[in-house]
Amino acid sequence: MSRYKHILLAVDLTEESNEVAQQASALADSFDADLSIVHVIEPLSLAYGGDIPMDLSSVQDQIHDQAKSHLSEFASSLAVPAERQYLIFGRPESEIQRVAQCKDADLIVVGSHGRHGLALLLGSTANGVLHGATCDVLAVRVGRQEAQTE
Ligand code: AMP
């Protein structure tokens, strides 16, 4: 059976990415699907608008270089080749959807914290990706221990 052929794993490169990656990798193995990875860097100008009166381009370059090497290390641990590693600038939700569409992914795998209260109202990346995605989306619950002790 080959239900999914191309799985796109979205990672924020925090420690929790490992939990999400294990699920994506196991699914890719069981469906004999290709696995790709995307990490989106939010431009500082988007995050802070015009509020900081200085040139942020060198800081942005450093963030890019660090993210590139971190992504490459992370992807190698999952045996994902360089041509299936995507490092993009923009808003995570829309860029993850766009990469999935451009690269013909049929499943997006993201992490989800199962938020509640105010955080739920403010939304999450998983919610944002789900709304408007043109393929299936799997939200892998992360940080369970944290949620149980709250
Ligand atoms: P959040 O709702 O921001 O806590 O993120 C939940 C999940 O969304 C993460 O586990 C990732 O799968 C995905 N995600 C969040 N930020 C990014 C990002 N900058 N690039 C790629 N995926 C992301």
Image (spheres, grey):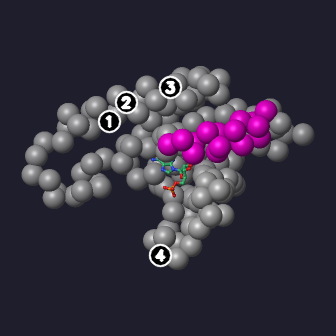
What secondary structure is found at the residue carrying circle 2? helix
Q: Main secondary structure of the magenta part?
A: helix
**To which residue does mark 1 refer?**
63
Using residue 142 as the reference point, say whether residue 125 is left or right of it. Answer: left
The mark nearer the N terminus, 4 or 3, is 3
Q: Position of residue 18 (x, y in %)?
A: 61, 39
**To which residue does mark 4 refer?**
118
Q: In this picture, which residue range is highlighted in magenta?
A: 14-29
The numbered mark at residue 72 is 3
Q: Residue furthest left?
A: 53
- Quadrant location of the C terminus in the rendered image: bottom right
Marks 4, 3: nearer the viewer:
4
User: To which quarter of the image does residue 20 belong?
Assistant: top right
Using residue 99 as the reference point, say whether residue 140 is left or right of it. Answer: right
Give amino acid for label 3: Ser
The mark nearer the N terminus, 1 or 3, is 1
- Quadrant location of the N terminus in the rendered image: top right
Give amino acid for label 1: Ile
State how far apart marks 4 and 1 are (Cα): 29 Å
| Residue at 72 percent of width and 43 percent of height | 23
State how far apart marks 2 and 4 are (Cα): 32 Å
Q: Nearer the viewer, residue 31 or 132?
A: 31
State how far apart marks 4 and 3 are (Cα): 35 Å
Q: Position of residue 29 (x, y in %)?
A: 79, 33
**To which residue does mark 2 refer?**
66
Q: Is residue 84 magenta?
A: no
Give amino acid for label 4: Leu
The mark nearer the N terminus, 3 or 2, is 2
Q: Is residue 38 in view from this perspective?
A: yes
